[in-house]
Amino acid sequence: MIHARLLGASLLLGVLALAGCSQGTPSTATSAPATSAPAAAPVASPTVSVPAKFAAGGVRVALVRQLSSGDYFEQWLAGAQAEAQALKVTLEVSSGDGNNDKQALNLEQAVQQKADAIIVDHGFADTVQPAIKKAADAGIPLVAFDVDPGTPKAVALTQDDHKIAELALGALKADTGGTGEVVYVYVSGFAPLDRRNEVWTTFKKDNPGIKEVAQIGVVNNSTASAVADQAKATLQANPNVKAIFAPYDEFAKGAAIAVKELGLQDKVKIYGADISTADIGVITEPNSPWVATATTDPSNVGRIAVRAAALLVAGEQVEPEIKIPPALVTQKQLVDGKIANIEQLTTAIPELTTPDVAPVPWAVP
Ligand code: SR1
């Protein structure tokens, strides 16, 4: 079921890639020569030659981040750096470390320093949009991940956040039978969390047996421990809670700490988002309360951001909106499959790797 859905999604992405391109000039792809010889096995090879600026190692892409701590952001950066290295791109990384003014200054600086492209990674619309506009006006190609750029000139990259919430809540509903008290972990203002919140709002209306008894949440440099403290107090005040919807892995990790400290593993289950090797460790611990997470592969998303930026620098076409489909990963699936790390997970769920999204024609696939 998951496979079929994801296959459909990637086919759709492929169709969109062919039909919906709107930026840059058309890419040149070589076509196979007409021949009567039997078809040889396909051999992976680049379809266009490396643009001169890339070959010379002269492409600078600024990655301007709002946040950088936590498994998700570390894996995402590792993917972005690996792709940059493969494409001979210099990735100039800055982080606001949760300080939105600092991120806006970093963005201004990337514009002033005339980066060949800018990737804006998270951020609040009112703090980043003024500098994004300056970059767009200056003709600097832009990729906006998980932030509303406020201009159609930027490629908007997201994970399918509605699907992430739907998958996690589908598991919550299946396990609870659609009834019971639930604690919700959320902080507004972060675009992906706001989109997941839209699904939660609808889910509550559609499932009147689900009662949200408390909303908690913090995003800072120690999100998991702050959420753990909040969740512990909330669970003590609400002894009938049977589920926690925590759609960000730092939230889910914090919730898991609280449930374990209170010895409530048999009563309270956690439905989260995102994954990392450390998260897999938490989910597969004996009697772990974190039973399901809906996720992409974060490093794959970082790779896509860099590929999209590189394509724009080369004047190639890129879809104006790129949405990466997630998969549901359950505790049972990880335990039964003896999956202990991200490499094993992506082998078990190959749809988490999406080389067909923003492919770079001069790179070996
Ligand atoms: C604070 S926002 C955290 C989310 O950003 C990314 O979309 C990850 O999926 C994470 O859940």
Image (tube, grey):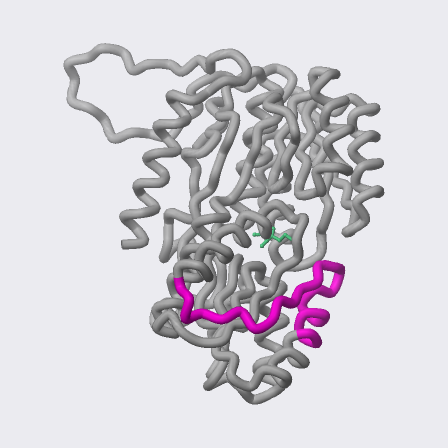
Q: Residue at x 49, y 34 (%)?
A: 322
Whole-percent x, y for residue 15 in the image = 35, 27
Quadrant location of residue 23? top right
Left or right: 113, with 322 as reference point: right
**For the N terminus, which image quadrant?**
bottom left
User: Left of 206 or right of it: where is 3?
Assistant: left
* Residue situated in front as seen by the camera: 199 or 268: 199
Residue 145 pos. (x, y %): 61, 39
Q: Position of residue 238 (x, y in %)?
A: 58, 82
Vertical placement of 316 versus 93: above or below?
Answer: above
- The segment highlighted magenta reads 207-230
| Residue at (45% x, 69% y) in the render | 210
State the image coordinates of residue 190 (x, y, percent, origin top left).
65, 48
- Say above or below: 349 vs 119: below
Does the stretch in magenta take in 13? no
Left/right of residue 22 with respect to residue 31 in the rendered view: right
Quadrant the C terminus occupies: top left
Q: Which residue is drawn at 55% across and 54% down?
A: 197
222 is within the stretch colored magenta: yes
Total labels: the figure holds 0
Residue located at (83% from left, 24% from top):
112
Question: Residue 286: in sight, yes or no?
Answer: no
In the rendered image, the vertical position of residue 209 relative to residue 196, given as above or below = below
Q: Quadrant of residue 46?
A: top left
Residue 173 sits in which quadrant? Answer: bottom left
